[in-house]
């Protein structure tokens, strides 16, 4: 009996110090990383930005699948225990294949159509995402399941991802594009606007300026971080102490924007940060 209790308590105290892996076509997934470090402060994280191949949104499914496999294999080579696909476009094209091919839990993302459809009072919701995300199975299935009787104002955010990659989210150029995409949603009386791409939360303030109080802006990053936490518990992969936490960042593009955004988001957090350019 004592022995059984001893084994049980060992099991309960098990801690997995391997990092969480996260990838995106570029720096957009940092909007998810920000929520992960808040909700899971004990966990180390390896972030992989495939900025050289960004944007994914206009690529074929086949290209995105191959890039996603490459990204996952990099993260596996860094000993990651779970992988967050912090990219709606990569999730849309590749999540089923990744889950089938690799023996590791994956967290994917899709535009938050369900909460928008549940909460709308006007019966009109707006969704801003990439072409690849709108064409994916997940978006189509979720829309037909939850938003059958809802008017959806769908907008492809052409050019927005590229602006964030160049750290130009706070420019007149960004403002003009956002007005072009968001204003028709406001005119259409949407009261929920879904940010269906992880690069878009970096435009939050500008979008808010355009919509005022007429609509709620839905950023699914917190829900993704919560889902990651849930799966770490389910698979018994949690790291139980805050010792030796590290955040490693790798990019296939330039380091400049990545470093700027990370330093903005990680204010007051004293962890070991490492950057490497894989160019
Ligand atoms: N952050 C990616 C997403 O969530 C950007 C897509 C792209 O690279 O076009 O969809």
Image (cartoon, rainbow, N blue to C red):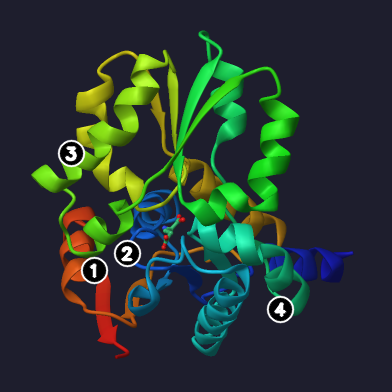
Q: Position of residue 66 (x, y in %)?
A: 59, 80
Q: Position of residue 14 (x, y in %)?
A: 64, 69
Distance between the alpha carbons at the discs numbered 3 and 1: 24 Å
Distance between the alpha carbons at the discs numbered 1 and 2: 6 Å
56 vs 224: above or below: below
253 vs 223: above or below: below
Q: Earlier in the sequence, mark 3 or mark 1?
A: 3
Residue 33 in view in this figure = yes
Residue 170 in view in this figure = no
Q: Which quadrant of the figure contains the C terminus?
A: bottom left
Residue 258 numbered tag: 1
Q: Quickly name the residue at label 3.
A: 176
233 displayed left or right of 178: right
Q: Quickly name the residue at label 4.
A: 102
Q: Earlier in the sequence, mark 1 or mark 2?
A: 2
Distance between the alpha carbons at the discs numbered 4 and 2: 24 Å
What residue lies at 53% left-to-right and 79% top-to-bottom?
A: 67
Q: Earlier in the sequence, mark 2 or mark 3?
A: 2
The kind of secondary structure element at disc 1 is helix
Q: Position of residue 57 (x, y in %)?
A: 46, 60
Q: Specify whether tag 3 is near ligand 1 (CB below 8 Å).
A: no
Distance between the alpha carbons at the discs numbered 3 and 4: 42 Å
Q: Earlier in the sequence, mark 1 or mark 4?
A: 4
């Amino acid at each position: 009996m004592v022995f059984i209790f001893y084994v049980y308590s060992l099991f309960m105290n098990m801690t997995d110090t391997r990092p969480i892996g996260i990838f995106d076509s570029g720096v957009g997934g940092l909007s998810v990383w920000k929520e992960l470090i808040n909700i899971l402060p004990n966990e180390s994280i390896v972030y992989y930005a495939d900025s050289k191949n960004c944007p994914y949104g206009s690529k074929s499914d086949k290209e995105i699948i191959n890039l996603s496999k490459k990204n996952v294999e990099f993260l596996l080579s860094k000993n990651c225990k779970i992988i967050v696909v912090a990219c709606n476009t990569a999730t849309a094209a590749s999540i089923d294949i990744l889950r089938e091919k690799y023996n590791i839990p994956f967290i994917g993302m899709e535009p938050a159509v369900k909460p928008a459809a549940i909460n709308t009072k006007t019966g009109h919701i707006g969704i801003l995402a990439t072409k690849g995300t709108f064409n994916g199975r997940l978006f189509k299935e979720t829309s037909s399941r939850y938003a059958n009787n809802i008017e959806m104002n769908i907008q492809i955010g052409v050019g927005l991802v590229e602006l964030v990659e160049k750290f130009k989210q706070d420019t007149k150029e960004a403002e003009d594009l956002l007005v072009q995409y968001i204003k028709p949603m406001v005119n259409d009386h949407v009261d929920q606007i879904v940010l269906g791409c992880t690069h878009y939360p970096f435009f939050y303030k500008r979008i808010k300026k355009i919509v005022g109080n007429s609509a709620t802006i839905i950023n699914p990053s917190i829900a993704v971080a919560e889902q990651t936490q849930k799966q770490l518990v389910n698979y018994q992969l949690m790291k139980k102490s805050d010792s030796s936490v590290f955040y490693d960042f790798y990019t296939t593009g330039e380091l400049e924007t990545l470093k700027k955004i990370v330093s903005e988001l990680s204010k007051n957090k004293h962890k070991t940060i490492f950057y490497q350019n894989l160019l």
